[in-house]
Amino acid sequence: MNMEHGHNGGVWRTILKVGAVLAVLGAVSWAMEHWGGGGMTLLSAFVAAQGSLAGAVFVTINAVAVMLLVPQSLFTVAAGAMFGWKLGGLLASIGMTIGALGAFLAARHGLRRVIVRRYGEHPVFRAMQRLSVSHPLRVLALSRLIPVMPFPATSYLLGIVSVRPLPFVFLTWLCMLPETLLLASGGHLLHSGITGRASVEAAVALLAAGVVLAVVVHRMKRRIVEAEKGD
């Protein structure tokens, strides 16, 4: 398998991505709160007033966004800001997984030719296709934990390789959970800081998710390197 270029720096890429997303959303949120008449406070109050409907709408929009190749980091941070890190992380995780399954099934049952024509010669896709024949779970976990392509695009590519739907759903949810909680906690802390309500609980969750993500990715990289040396 020739995907070493995606192994190195996986943790740092995640940290940089989280930092960049939080910086952009932080600037927008601060502007809304201080120059937009308390926009963030009003947004939180509006979401709270919608009850369970707000969560259902968010999950639906998030799932559709995955299928439209929209970056998920923004949605996850926004979920943490609007719903809190626990509920926001849960809603983002559900929406992301449903959208990924939709992309997977669309690729497998309708868009195969389009995707092969677009990505057929891409080295990452060829490596995924080759490895999925003998190690489908490994390529699935690898593509989620150490992504070398955006999450939405990878969901389509996994739909046309030798990966079954049930393991796809479970491992997509499980492997993305630490990063989802990391981003949702960051979004919640961002909102708490802007509106003047500190959240120690979210800070602890952010730190824990970051540690889990770093450890899991490190172990995954080590096992993959050892497996490649053995092959």
Image: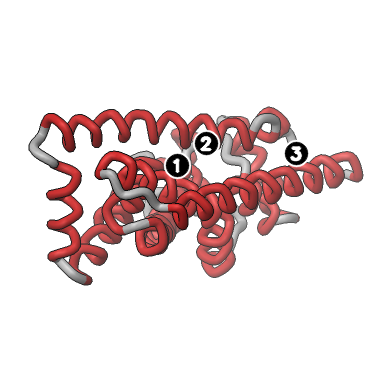
Marks 1/2: CA–CA distance:
7 Å
Q: CA distance from mark 3 to mark 2?
A: 16 Å
Across and down, in percent, residue 109 comes to 41, 59
Q: Earlier in the sequence, mark 3 or mark 2?
A: 3
| Residue 59 or residue 200, whichever sits in front | 200
Query: Could you say whether the residue bearing mark 3 is in a helix, strand or loop?
Result: loop
Left or right, 226 with respect to 39, comes to right
Q: Residue furthest right?
A: 230
In terms of depth relative to the viewer, which is nearer, 211 or 101? 211
On the image, numbered disc 2 is attached to which residue?
A: 149
Marked residue nearer the N-terminal end (3 or 1): 3
Which residue is disc 1 drawn over? 153
Residue 1: assigned label: 3
Asked if residue 6 lies left or right of residue 169, the reply is right
Q: Taking 126 as reference, is 19 left or right? A: left
Q: How is the image coloured?
A: secondary structure
Query: Quick check: 220 left or right of 27?
Result: right
Label annotation for residue 229: none
Extreme residue in the left direction: 37
Task: Please identify the quarter of the rendering in which residue 99 is found.
Answer: bottom left
CB atoms of marks 3 and 1 within 8 Å: no
Q: Amino acid at mark 2?
A: Met
**Image label count:** 3
Q: Nearer the viewer, residue 49 or 62?
A: 49
- Residue 202 image position (x, y, % from top left): 45, 53
**Residue, x 55% and y 35% (percent of image)?**
15
Q: Nearer the viewer, residue 185 or 110?
A: 185
Mark 3, residues whose alpha carbon is within 10 Å: few (<14), some, or many (≥20)? some
Give the amino acid type for the residue marked by disc 1 in the picture: Ala
